[in-house]
Image: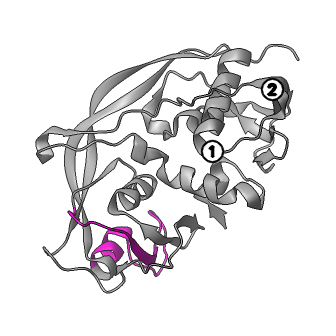
Amino acid sequence: MTTSQAELFRTPRAFAFAISIVVALLPLAAQGQSATPSTTSSPAALQPDVQPSLRFEVASIRQRESDRDEPSNRQILPGGRFVATATTVRTLIRIAFGLDDNLISGAPGWTDSETFDINATTANHVEVSSPQQFQQLILSLLEDRFQFKYHREEKEAPVYWLELDKPGKLGPGLKPSTPDSQPNMSTNSNNLRAAMKASKMSMNDVAAALRRQAGRPVEDHTGLKGNFDFQIEWAPEETDSTYASLFTVLKEQLGLKLQPARGTSEILIIDQVTRPSGN
């Protein structure tokens, strides 16, 4: 079974909560609201912006022989260390900006096919204390060692509005969070089943997490305030699973629906990226 968190990077337990939140919610920072379905505006790509800025002081990057069956791992370790194995440059770009592939344009083919091992340490071994700092570090690594340059452009694109299926009525599986509920969002899937478990999450958070599952940006238009808990399972697209579709599960269990709409998406355009400079 694979998880959406694991697709980007894996971390020790001490940092696991922050990492699970950033993977699930990074698209939220990219999403905006609009007045009508025909003029929806979202998302703006996340620009890592952390004060004070962290950078890697030492970074060893070595290309390795490509092996599609080889596991790809990324870890944050104590002492400001970042260790990655069998990792593509496209993966690093996705992490740095919190974007899906369909919002990234101009990457040469080798950024998908060639993999690298990376061992890097922050200046003075400063610990990485937030997901935003981690993004900033990855962006600085791309700029320093891969000569990465980019700009942004907006284009019209389909989006979904997350709405209540019936005004004022929650589904049986959507429960207001209790005071002792702890924030958590996790998603995992295999060939037959996908699952999402959320606790103490706002509807904005839920919309952001659904973006990857729905295949396009999702905006919260439920009007629901506060935080909620739920757990759902559904059939991934193009499978013979006996589970219901995501759209059916959202409607029947949570009382929510994904309403197609049009909007604008900010695309990350890659102007330059080269194979890494020598160690």
The residue pinned by badge 1 equals: 130
Q: Is residue 36 above or below residue 237?
A: above
Q: Is residue 88 above or below residue 279?
A: below
The reply, left or right, for residue 260 in relation to residue 74 is left
Whole-percent x and y of residue 171? 28, 82
Q: Can see residue 118?
A: no
Tell me: residue 269, above or below residue 246.
above
**Picture residue at 69% right of the left edge, 58% below the top:** 16
In this rendering, would 217 be left or right of 224? right
- Label 1 SS: loop
Quadrant of the rendered structure where residue 123 is?
Answer: top right
| Residue at the spot 48% in from the left edge and 52% down from the top edge | 25
Residue position marked by numbered label 2 in the rendering: 123
Q: Is residue 251 left or right of residue 110?
A: left
Magenta span = 222-251
Q: How many marks?
A: 2
Write the residue at 63% across / 36% down. 133
Pick the residue in front: 16 or 215. 16
In the image, what residue occupies the spot 40% across and 58% down? 205
Q: Quadrant where the C terminus lies?
A: top right
Check the image and tell me how it is coloured. Answer: one colour
Q: Secondary structure at mark 2?
A: helix
